[in-house]
Amino acid sequence: MTDLSPSRWPREGEDDARIDAAIESTRNFFHRTGIQTRLGEYDVAASDIETIVSTLTEHGMTQLGEHGAITPKMPVVSSKPLNKRDPR
């Protein structure tokens, strides 16, 4: 069973703690397989994001993610954490 198995995530407790545990399990899984989970770990700078978004758009890749909800119209985020759970 991998860390990604929902059966290993806490089922009780505060939502934030459960969410943090699921995110940490997911990151650990990818790190064990040699896949990094942050763009900076691939030497992608904030200044590269505009070029990446433009290239994806040119190739028609404008609805990314499991539900197609990640689009070029999303606001650009800074290098600050996206939320209190993101320890960047």
Image (cartoon, helix red, strand yellow):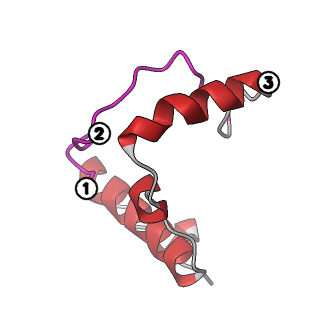
Q: What element carries label 3?
A: loop
Q: What residue type is labelled 2?
A: Leu
Q: Which of marks 2 and 1 is nearer the N terminus?
A: 2
Q: What element carries label 1?
A: loop
Query: Quadrant location of residue 66?
Result: top right
Q: Nearer the viewer, residue 65 or 18?
A: 65
Q: Which of marks 2 and 3 is nearer the N terminus?
A: 3
- The answer to if 5 sits in the magenta stretch is no
- Mark 1, residue position: 88
Q: In this view, does 1 lie above or below 30?
A: below
Of marks 3 and 1, the one in the foreground: 3
Q: Which amino acid does label 3 sit on?
A: Gly
State the image coordinates of residue 80 (x, y, percent, origin top left): 22, 41
Residue 15 is tagged as none
Disc 2 to disc 3, how far (Cα)? 26 Å
- Mark 3, residue position: 60
**Residue at the right extreme?**
59
State the image coordinates of residue 65 (x, y, percent, origin top left): 65, 38
Tell me: 52 left or right of 8: right
Disc 3 to disc 1, how far (Cα)? 30 Å
Residue placed at 58% from the left, 29% from the top? 53
Labels 2 & 1 near each other (Cβ < 8 A) = yes
Q: In this view, does 54 lie above or below 13?
A: above
Disc 2 to disc 1, how far (Cα)? 9 Å
- Mark 2, residue position: 82
Read off the magenta span: 67-88
Tell me: 47 left or right of 62: left
Q: Earlier in the sequence, mark 3 or mark 1?
A: 3
Quarter of the figure with the N terminus? bottom right
